[in-house]
Amino acid sequence: MDNLREKLKNCTKCPLHCTRTNVVISDGSVSADIMLIGEAPGADEDKTGIPFVGRAGKLLNEFLIKAGLDRKKDLYIANTVKCRPPENRKPTKEEKIACEDNLKKQIDMVKPKVIILCGATAMESFIKDKKLTISKARGQVFDLNGIKLVPIFHPSYLLRQHSMQKGSPRDLMLEDLKMVKALVNSCKETT
Ligand code: SF4
């Protein structure tokens, strides 16, 4: 992990290195059973060097607590690209490809039982079905060489959706995170 951190601190493999303040590598535990992968750092993440610490990150924390998950112990959190795209735009295909190896190394290191794909950008990097939207994919479990992949809404989308009524995006987010917890528990029982 220290080697990767050192390497990434000086990474200039894509143009995002020109505008970043900090390379945003990870938060949580490297021995976690769950890895959560988001899109890219935003302004707060770029400033602090920690993923999911802005408004969306705080909302994610609330949902994790409600689902009975401990962000620091149960999860390892990373992003598809490690440097902030200007104006919070989506990372380009080229930037995602440039950073792909770094994400693979993180997955190899953590060896998660379940990967939460947070939002469409993370989902598209792993599930190659152009017709699949996050609304259709959420609630389903996909496979990556034995690792369970669970797409969920990105918390930044939920910042604009306030209802907690049955079937609302926030209600579904909680349902999905509870499913992740149950999946991890069932993986532990079978090993
Ligand atoms: Fe390197 Fe990834 Fe940052 Fe691009 S986004 S400079 S590939 S660490």
Image (cartoon, helix red, strand yellow):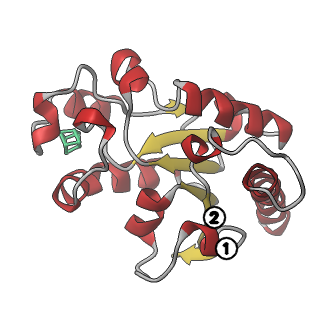
Q: The N terminus appears in which quarter of the rendering?
A: top left
Mark 1 surroundings: few (<14), some (14-19) or many (≥20) residues within 10 A: some
Q: In this orientation, does residue 102 appear? A: yes
- Of 131 and 35, nearer the camera is 131
Disc 2 to disc 1, C-alpha distance: 5 Å
| Amino acid on which disc 1 is placed | Val
Q: Kindly identify which numbered label has been placed on residue 17.
A: none
- Helix, strand or loop at mark 2: strand
Residue 6 location in percent, x, y?
A: 24, 27
Q: Is ligand 1 closer than 8 angstroms to the Cβ of mark 1?
A: no
Left or right of 128 on screen, residue 56: right
Q: Is residue 32 above or below residue 8?
A: below
Q: Circles 2 and 1: CB distance less than 8 Å?
A: yes
Name the residue beneath numbered marker 2.
Answer: 150
Name the residue beneath numbered marker 1.
Answer: 141
- Of 37 and 147, nearer the camera is 37
Residue 174 location in percent, x, y?
A: 80, 50
Q: The C terminus appears in which quarter of the rendering?
A: bottom right
**Dividing the picture into quarters, in which one does residue 8 lie?**
top left
- Of 149 and 74, nearer the camera is 149
Q: Is residue 142 above or below residue 123?
A: below
Residue 115 location in percent, x, y?
A: 58, 58
Q: In this orientation, does residue 31 appear? A: no
- Helix, strand or loop at mark 1: loop
